[in-house]
Image: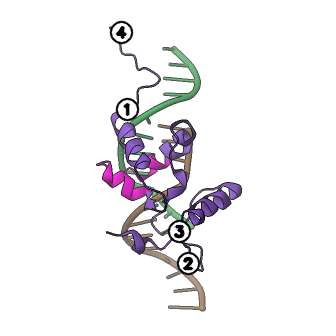
Chain colours: A purple, B brown, C green
Amino acid sequence: MNREHKSVTQLAPFTAEVVQILKEIPPGYVVTYGQVARMAGSPRAARQVVRILHSMSEKYGLPWHRVVNAKGEIAVPNNDSREVQRLLLEAEGVSFTKDGRVDLARFEK
DNA sequence: GCCATGGCTAGTA
DNA sequence: GCCATGGCTAGTA
């Protein structure tokens, strides 16, 4: 251990912070990628949040479905996953507008 | 090089 | 529709 060596289980600080924040999102609550980035102290790192969600959701049991883009749209590329995300949110009581968006104003507080 | 953004402009109607 | 953004990781040497 006298050389640079990262344990596989050791997350980088920013990543660990984001993972923690995501884990604390309660059922029925929705946040945006940008909001999570801001909460983690790096306002412009929204895409990084995306990357974390994309690659670590399964392993860390992250509530990936509770994160949408700034417009309130489901932003997952895969069609099946999009459907799953919507169903999971609806099951938690989240409603959608006619154009398929989450009413984010509802969560501002 | 990845990535599921975000915010600003151009251009249509 | 365009494109700057950012923190990390895979993969090479």
Residue at 47%, 23% in the rendered image: A8
**Circle 2 SS class:** loop
Residue A99 sits above or below residue A77 on the image: below
Question: How far apart are labels 2 and 4 at the CA level?
Answer: 54 Å
Question: How far apart are labels 4 and 3 at the CA level?
Answer: 48 Å
Q: Are marks 1 and 4 in contact (CB under 8 Å)?
A: no
Residue type pointed to by label 1: Ala
Residue situated furthest right in the rendering? A80
The location of residue A76, given as percent across then percent down, is 60, 56
Q: Which sits earlier in the primary sequence, circle 1 or circle 2?
A: 1
Q: Is the residue marked by circle 3 packed among few (<14), some (14-19), or many (20+) residues within 10 Å? A: some
**Circle 3 SS class:** loop
Residue at 45%, 50% in the rendered image: A47
Q: Main secondary structure of the magenta part?
A: helix
Q: Is the residue marked by circle 4 packed among few (<14), some (14-19), or many (20+) residues within 10 Å? A: few
Query: Tag on residue A97?
Result: 2
Bounds of the magenta span? A33-50
Residue A63 sits above or below residue A75 on the image: above
Quarter of the image where the N terminus of chain A is located: top left
Q: State whether discs 1 and 3 lie on one chain.
A: yes
The mark closer to the camera, 4 or 3, is 3
Question: How far apart are labels 1 and 4 at the CA level?
Answer: 17 Å
A101 or A28: nearer the viewer: A28
Chain ID for label 4? A
Q: State whether discs 2 and 3 lie on one chain.
A: yes
